[in-house]
Image (tube, grey):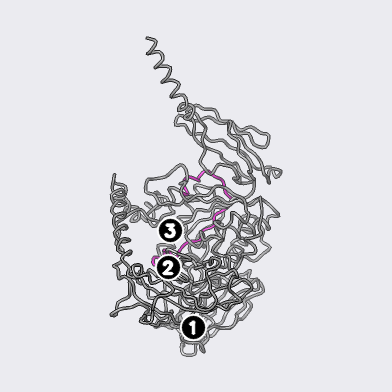
Amino acid sequence: MKFNQLLTLSTLFSVLPLLNLEAEVKTPRFISDGMVLQRNETVRIWGTADPGEKVTITFLNNKYKGTADAQGNWMVYIPTTKKSMIGGPYTMTINERKLSDIYVGDVWLCSGQSNMDLHTARLVDLYKDEFDTDVNPAIHLMQTGRNPSVKGPQNDIDEQGSYPWESMSPDKVGHWSGISYFFAKEMFRRTGGVPQGIINCSMGGSDIVAWISTDSLRENAPRHVQTVEHLKQPGYLERCAALNRAIGETYNQLLNEDPGLKGQWMRADLDDSDWEVVNQYDPHLGDADGRTWVGTLWFRKEFNVPQELVGKDSLLRLGCLVDADVAYLNGEKVGEVTYQYPPRKYTLPAGLLKAGRNVLVIKLRTNGSPEKFVKEKPYKLFFHGGQTIDLEGDWRMKRGILMPRQPGVEGVNNGNASALYDNTIYPLRNYRIAGILWNQGETNAGRPDEYRKLLPVLINDWRRDFGDVPAVIFGLANFMERHADANYDGGWARIREAQRLGTQSLDKAGFVTAIDLGEWNDIHPLNKKESARRAALWMQRLYLGDNTEVVEGPTFESITFSEGKAIITFKPGTADGLILRSGKPHSKDTPGIYSFGFSIAGEDGIFQWCEALVINNNQLLLWNDRITNPVAVRYAWDDDPIVTLYNGAGLPAPSFSTK
């Protein structure tokens, strides 16, 4: 009897900790230290507890109460409408739990793909001084996890890949979104010091359909919902993942059979006299028997270092390489990047460089792209004090291992329907925000008509979650080669038009034109500061209600045709009228032929470059003497367009087509 009593007591005591754990009042992980609460709102704080559990929140000497419902969910409402509440840092207690470093100000949801996600660490070539010195305890950012999922809507963000709320300081901002960073600084200035909170939930390469709820997709683009139904079958994804792991292990084992690894081709004393001499920008670099090489290519280059530079701090810049590289200097590995986009910046260890002859080796893994070394990027050694050693030009090359393209088995990805909405946007749905910034579209460049339809669907979808807040949409920046053919009708021009027209169909929405902020050879341009400033101009009008500044460039309103000419009228409000800047070459192949970026078509539908002249302050006269009866006009209709039309505020006109 005593034994049974002791056993019962022992069992009771052993489960008490579990009972206490179950009774704990919990919140989503982003309701935490450092959060920024939206001003002029009724803020919601929510979470889970035992059914019937009482929840008391103390904030700014006031108590707010709630009770967990039968499912254990609770929500407490806190008004932030008093002007005196703006600021911080404050503390908040949720029952016994204490949160600190809380501010009341403006909260912005920043989302999209890689150009929204691009971290400030990638932008140091332009803004290092700012990143190294900026400290502002009233600007905070929180990064959500962004792992695609087909498990349905989640109640909390994914912990993997997320960052908690943190304030702006040099030791933190390296992993902040660059656009978010500059936008928060700009809005802090424009609001006279109102605290700023950024929720960044973006993912490189993501498709717009991944960010829209299943219900909205089922109504507007049901085919995307249907394509993921089989992924939800029990055990299917687990089996696919196991197969992919096996394929990856086998593929990597084959890569390790690389003769360059076995023969130690990175050695400084290797005899490379039988290696091919190649130019790094040869469009057929590495091709063999008319076939683009997939596998590894090895490159070697000798260079001399003067005695006076030995011992100085040095940085090796290898531009951008397609696709993955390992770099060796004098036989020692000095850096590695596993995919094509990041700039190669390798700090060299002290003592590695020698006076006189040095040997640089690159093991490049290529997946078949004709481009290996991206043009107009720095391939140099940089020394403290400003001296450089140029590494462009001829290299010695030898083919490593020839590989098939790596096969794969289906899995969840950032293009699946609702795969990012469910575990990044839906968990935030009760959080109150000031507005939305959306920077995405590169992945959808092949489906512009669908994108034009889905963009307003996405914004309205999110407004059902977050309230009827203003939205700013970023158009794609200029990228890739410019085309001499006026009839080029590429995906990037068409997706920009879809973005512009989709934005126009929304209330309280603005369109940021960025066709002059890109880089033809980099899908991730560095000038995020100006992009953010243009977004802040829009939010100053849409959110703050301040109409004192011009927020957009000349915007197409109408077109008429008369006497063989086209007359385009632009919307009123253009600052200081239209400004037509100097023409530019159509392409690198036509350096002496200039254009204003306008083309005109006759009844045959064939476009030709045309002349342009500003008339009547807000109108343009366009003509081509070879076209007597024009019917359509295009402007900046290219991947990397000629951009010449601005207003006095320095804002460019967006591209457009009247066809």
Residue 586: image tag = 1
Kindly tell me whether residue 442 is visible in this rendering.
yes
Q: CA distance from mark 1 to mark 2?
A: 34 Å
The mark lying in front, picked from 2 and 3, is: 2
Q: Quadrant of the N terminus?
A: top left
Which of 235 and 515 lies nearest the eye of the viewer? 235
Position of 72 relative to 615 (above/below): above
Residue placed under numbered mark 2 in the picture: 325
Label 3 or label 1, whichever comes before in sequence order: 3
Q: CA distance from mark 2 to mark 3?
A: 31 Å
In magenta, the rendered stretch is: 424-448
Identify the amino acid type marked 3. Answer: Ile
Identify the amino acid type marked 1. Answer: His
Q: Position of residue 486 (x, y in %)?
A: 45, 81
Q: Residue at x 47, y 46 (%)?
A: 159
Q: Position of residue 235 (x, y in %)?
A: 28, 45
User: Helix, strand, or loop for circle 3?
Assistant: helix
- Location of residue 396 (image quadrant): bottom left
Residue placed under numbered mark 3 in the picture: 208
Label 2 or label 3, whichever comes before in sequence order: 3
User: Helix, strand, or loop for circle 2?
Assistant: strand
Label 1 or label 2, whichever comes before in sequence order: 2
Which of 525 and 323 lies nearest the eye of the viewer? 323
Position of 608 relative to 492 (above/below): below
